[in-house]
Image (cartoon, helix red, strand yellow):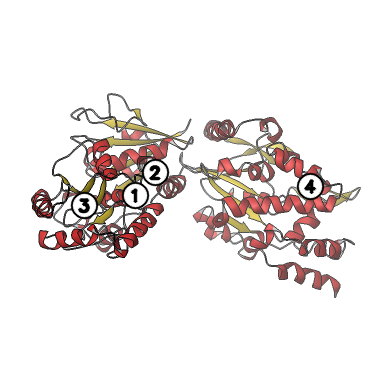
């Protein structure tokens, strides 16, 4: 079943903090590998904010969760030391956590992966020297569907004064004296009504507390197409740039009113601020918040890791090396690609999640796992160097491995499929921690020729069954090398599009003795194997090597995003000497 992320809320009334927690619940819900569960304190008022989470039941049992998500004062509800057995993600939305006099300050000493809503918040808590765990910045985002274009605005100025009511009333009084149509709110109103007033106003005056962690209303006003006037609040400096996205007078009526009046006329400044506000709002879309958050969830053990890459690029070697690490299991092509080809995207992801769960259970209960193997271990190379009828002999002799390196129940599990997972990257990359191994494209093409695999004939049934467009593209050509180059282009393009920052080169893997795999599993930094590059294995024996190199160099190929042409030319030059 999906990993559970447990939330806790004590809801006494609507606030921006509660709204942002609800957004994070929705982010968890969007990923089928996770299930959001919420325990709402019985003293809470009713709310529809938590509709994306499953209720936890009558008892709060944080020790049963896979991951705990805490925000605000939630730490007070969990047992001391729970973080030693259940990983905690801690959302920090305010600057009060950095104040030694505030109860939130003491929470920093408890281990957690912390997410701050602005750089200012991150800087403040880091400066305390008290943070126990990593600190990330994920700026607060908006739901684009809540903000629609509106050219018919009946309000001159809307003042959001819930946090500064006296200032709001003073500003409203003076602006009304100038004959402006002003609407002011000094108390909480339903969110839908608040958004309606933003969309109905030409100018929005958003009044924060003196110190805010982010101050979402200013960003919402920009997204609604308002000209924004907003005093400095420290944590709003990422979005509020004076003279660029808004005007930032001091928090005094004598300064706020002139700022508003300067925008009443349709001036060049007004046009500049509207454009700047739209640019800022466009950076704060849902995916900009959701994707890095899901990357953080995926980095928390027990991790489910997807490994793919070019066939004959070192993916089996990668599994062998990772499988030597404590609490890491790496499976070599354990699934049946041809049986899954007809599955829709969501169904395929669900099948992969289920397979991860099944393997975890088998490892815990039997100490074994499904995997292509040699002597019940993943070999470093699935092919030997002996040839039979011009094809290399396989080293694979079984489909089960013994797992003896698992110490903790929270072990990391890696599943490798080069062709199938490459074809399915569009649906896998948003859900899982995905990585790919690539290799010098000429070496790959030459290795395919004597591999005995379908790639030697310029086809990939495992990939084609999952991507009909690839199958049609390969079927168009009768030239084996043309098909091989096209298939290689397809795979490199997949990695460039979906996981460009999580693609590792075989050459770096070998040169580092395996330590480069720390990009996948941090503990791999200690691997120090004597590895030998096999890139030049066929350069002197394959009579077509130079011709293949020239064909490859003539193409506008996706491989050149990872390798330059000189890396291929250098290999050919060595062969020619």
In this rendering, position of residue 44 left or right of residue 571: left
Of the image marks 3 and 2, the number of the one nearer the N terminus: 2
Of the image marks 1 and 3, the number of the one nearer the N terminus: 3
Q: Which mark is residue 455?
A: 4
Of the image marks 4 and 1, the number of the one nearer the N terminus: 1
In this rendering, position of residue 529 left or right of residue 77: right
Q: Are marks 4 and 1 in contact (CB under 8 Å)?
A: no
Front-lying residue, 235 or 456: 235
Q: Which mark is residue 144?
A: 2
Of the image marks 1 and 2, the number of the one nearer the N terminus: 2
Of the image marks 2 and 4, the number of the one nearer the N terminus: 2
Farthest residue toward the bottom? Answer: 577
- The structure residue drawn at horizontal position 68% and vertical position 57%, both measured from the top left corner, is 558
Q: Position of residue 490 (x, y in %)?
A: 69, 50
Q: Position of residue 296 (x, y in %)?
A: 43, 48
> Callout 1 environment at 10 Å: few (<14), some (14 to 19), or many (20+)?
many
Q: CA distance from mark 4 to mark 1?
A: 50 Å
- The structure residue drawn at horizontal position 13% and vertical position 52%, both measured from the top left corner, is 179
Q: Are marks 1 and 2 in contact (CB under 8 Å)?
A: yes
> Callout 3 environment at 10 Å: few (<14), some (14 to 19), or many (20+)?
many
Q: CA distance from mark 3 to mark 2?
A: 20 Å
> SS for tag 3?
strand
Q: Is residue 246 visible?
A: yes
Q: CA distance from mark 4 to mark 3?
A: 61 Å
Farthest residue toward the top? Answer: 58
Q: Name the residue that disc number 3 marks.
A: 206
Q: Position of residue 271 (x, y in %)?
A: 33, 60
Front-lying residue, 32 or 212: 212
Q: Name the residue that disc number 1 marks.
A: 223
Q: Are marks 2 and 4 in contact (CB under 8 Å)?
A: no
> Callout 2 environment at 10 Å: few (<14), some (14 to 19), or many (20+)?
some
């Amino acid at each position: 079943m999906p990993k559970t992320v447990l939330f806790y809320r004590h809801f006494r009334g609507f606030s921006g903090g509660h709204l942002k927690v609800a957004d994070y619940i929705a982010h968890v819900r969007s990923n089928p590998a996770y299930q959001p569960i919420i325990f709402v304190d019985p003293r809470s008022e009713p709310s529809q904010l938590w509709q994306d989470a499953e209720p936890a039941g009558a008892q709060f049992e944080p020790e049963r969760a896979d991951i705990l998500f805490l925000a605000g004062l939630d730490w007070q509800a969990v047992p001391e030391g729970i973080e030693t057995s259940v990983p905690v993600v801690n959302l920090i939305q305010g600057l009060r956590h950095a104040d030694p006099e505030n109860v939130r300050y003491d929470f920093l000493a408890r281990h957690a992966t912390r997410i701050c809503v602005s750089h200012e918040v991150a800087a403040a808590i880091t400066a305390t020297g008290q943070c126990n765990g990593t600190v990330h910045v994920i700026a607060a985002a908006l739901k684009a569907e809540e903000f629609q274009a509106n050219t018919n605005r009946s309000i001159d100025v809307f003042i959001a004064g819930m946090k500064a009511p006296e200032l709001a009333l003073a500003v409203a009084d003076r602006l009304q004296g100038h004959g402006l149509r002003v609407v002011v709110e000094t108390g909480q109103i339903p969110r839908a009504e608040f958004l309606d007033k933003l969309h109905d106003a030409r100018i929005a005056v958003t009044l924060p507390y003196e110190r805010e962690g982010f101050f979402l209303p200013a960003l919402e006003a920009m997204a609604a197409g308002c000209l924004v006037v907003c005093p400095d609040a420290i944590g709003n400096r990422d979005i509020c740039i004076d003279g660029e996205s808004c005007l930032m007078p001091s928090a005094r009526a004598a300064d706020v009113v002139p700022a508003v009046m300067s925008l009443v006329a349709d001036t060049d400044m007004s046009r500049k601020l509207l454009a700047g506000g739209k640019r800022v709002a466009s950076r704060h879309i849902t995916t900009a918040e959701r994707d890095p958050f899901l990357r953080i969830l995926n980095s928390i053990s027990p991790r489910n890791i997807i490994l793919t890459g070019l066939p004959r690029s070192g993916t089996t070697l990668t599994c062998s090396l990772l499988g030597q690490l404590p609490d890491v299991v790496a499976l070599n092509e354990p699934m049946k690609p041809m049986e899954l080809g007809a599955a829709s995207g969501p169904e395929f992801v669900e099948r992969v999640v289920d397979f991860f769960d099944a393997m975890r259970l088998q490892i815990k209960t039997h100490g074994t796992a499904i995997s292509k193997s040699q002597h019940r271990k993943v070999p470093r190379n699935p092919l030997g160097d002996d040839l039979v009828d011009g094809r290399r002999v396989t080293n694979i002799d079984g489909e089960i491995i013994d797992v003896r390196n698992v110490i903790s129940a929270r072990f990391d599990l890696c599943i490798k499929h080069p062709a199938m997972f490459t074809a399915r990257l569009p649906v896998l990359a948003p859900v899982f921690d995905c990585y790919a191994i690539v290799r010098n494209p000429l070496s790959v093409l030459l290795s395919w020729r004597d591999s005995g695999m379908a790639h030697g004939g310029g086809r990939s049934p495992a990939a084609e069954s999952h991507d009909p467009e690839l199958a049609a593209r390969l079927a168009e050509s009768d030239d084996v090398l043309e098909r091989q180059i096209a298939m290689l282009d397809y795979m490199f393009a997949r990695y460039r599009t979906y996981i460009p920052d999580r693609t590792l080169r075989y050459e770096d893997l070998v040169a580092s003795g395996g330590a480069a795999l720390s990009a996948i599993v941090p503990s791999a930094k200690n691997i120090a194997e004597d590895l030998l590059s096999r890139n030049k294995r066929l350069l002197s024996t394959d009579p077509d090597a130079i011709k293949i190199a020239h064909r490859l160099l003539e193409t506008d190929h996706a491989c050149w995003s990872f390798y330059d042409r000189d890396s291929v030319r250098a290999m050919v030059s060595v062969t020619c000497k």
